[in-house]
Image (cartoon, coloured by chain):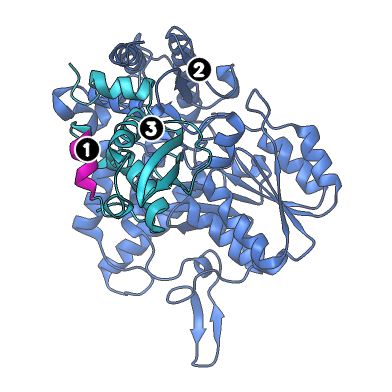
Amino acid sequence: MDDLYRDYILDHYKHPRNFGELEPHDLEAMEHNPLCGDELGVQIRVRDGRIEDLRFNGHGCAISQAAASIASEELKGMSLQEAGELPADWMIELLGIPVSATRRKCALLNLKVVKGAVTGQGDWPA
Amino acid sequence: MKGTPSGGLRGVRSDFPILRERPGGRPLVYLDSGATSQKPKVVIDAVSEHLARHNANIHRGVYPLAQEADAAFDRARERVAAFVGAPVRGTVFTKNATEAINLVAYSWGQANVKAGDAVLITQMEHHANLVPWQQLCRQTGATLRWLEVDEHGRISLDALDAELARGDVRLLAVAHVSNVLGTINPVAEMTARARAAGALTLIDGAQAVPQMPVDFASSGADFYVWTGHKALGPTGIGVLHARPELLEEMPPFLTGGDMIASVSLQETTWNEVPFKFEAGTPPIAEAVGLAAAVDYLDGLGMERVRAHELELTEYMLSRLGEVPGVRVVGPAKASERGALASFTVEGMHPHDVAELLGREGVCVRAGHHCAQPLMRCLGVAATARASLGVYNDRSDVDALVTALVAGREVFGL
């Protein structure tokens, strides 16, 4: 079995969860991966200070799309404060694959866009 | 001239030490020469020899070692100019092709482009031949217009005529060979039409000079730029060719040492061309290395290099056509394109393609290739690109195709 392109990664890539439009939504953001020009956006509906629902949209490589899909399932129900403070390692561990330095931005793009929507700070997650 | 049965230039491969490397225990299949070329041993040795035995600053010392460095740098300029049929006084060394374009945009552009004027580019330009013109237009109030690329990756000469007929175009800036589509633009035809309309021309030859005969005089260009590191030379050196009279009229770009004739605290007079445009210590060892690179290319013969790359490009297009889901962008005919193929694989992102190929030792580029407007026009975010050099042969293309087929299997395609 491939180290990077594991079955569940390819499954999330080919059948991404929580992708599309979310209406109505309370928060949204859009980010680019400068390496490849890929775009990823998110729309979030908030209820009682928590992420009630969210949808990603855009296009990207298997790593960035699978990361967004996997993260989307964990982000539902999370408080905005917790989501805004998520470290990069949260995403890397959730992915469960060895992410090389050159692919790190692919893996973290979704977290960057979510944190941008929640906090207004669009820095790369540390 | 005959190549080897494997479609390579005879004996060339063994001239490149890096091709004996085995990263990750696999043979190196280098298909990223459009990004930077590998270097023959003669270039590596020329740089090393210069630094070990002839190194001194130029245009300053009177001791014998300094004179050796002066002579080496002067000879390098003569060799590089002769390689593309350009005048020595009209040959300026820069840091890279990007800096050469910036030199023209700031020096010639600021002095000659005004509000109401237009700068004309094409939709297939590398960001290096787009952003400096965007900036110039923003600063001067001029308008940036562009020629569109058709579905075959070509520029229409009728569209060029229509743009020039508007009478406001001061400069046409166009790639000789597209770094994404591979399209070879008819630059002599384009520069002739621009000149007839009173516009100057800048040709970005970064992808052309390494792979085909280029003659500055017959290109008809007012400015022709290229870079050393894509043409078997070192990084850190680029070249601007221009008519010396044109350079003489232009104000300096960067100022400081070496580019002056005399300096008082109030006033400075400029050195003669090309030195007026080479502020500070230039890339001396790099120039020596680039001279060795063009000597090497001349030894192969640029007609032979082009014939080799044409034949190998035909083979690559044909082999890529065998892989299901692969779509190559740009002109269908190899004769209309340089030695590269940008492609997409249905169901796979170009980054994943490049990652899976890389594991098999096959080095290709993936991304927007510094040409985002063109990517939007093609309707893709990115492509993978395999680009060829003098050292490639059919075995490299076969390795590419084998790795592509294996990569599709990983993705269940």
Q: Position of residue B165 (x, y in %)?
A: 86, 45
Question: Which residue, given by chain and number where applicable, does mark 3 sit on?
Answer: B365
Question: Which residue, given by chain and number where applicable, does mark 1 sit on?
Answer: A100
Question: Which residue, given by chain and number where applicable, does mark 2 sit on?
Answer: B327
Q: Residue at x 53, y 63 (%)?
A: B274
Chain identifier, colour cyan:
A
The answer for which chain carries disc 3 is B
**Is residue B52 highlighted in magenta?**
no
First in residue order: circle 3 vs circle 2: 2
User: What stretch of residues is rendered in magenta?
Assistant: A87-94
Secondary structure under badge 3? strand
Q: Are marks 1 and 3 on the same chain?
A: no
> Chain B: what color?
blue
Label 3 to label 2: alpha-carbon separation: 16 Å
Q: Are marks 1 and 3 in contact (CB under 8 Å)?
A: no
Q: Quadrant of the C terminus of chain B?
A: top left
Quadrant of res B215: top right
Viewer-side residue, B69 vs A95: A95
- Residues packed near mark 3 inside 10 Å, few (<14), some (14 to 19) or many (20 plus): many
Q: Are marks 2 and 1 in contact (CB under 8 Å)?
A: no
Q: Position of residue B304 (x, y in %)?
A: 47, 23
* Placement of B375 over or under B267, stated as above or below: above
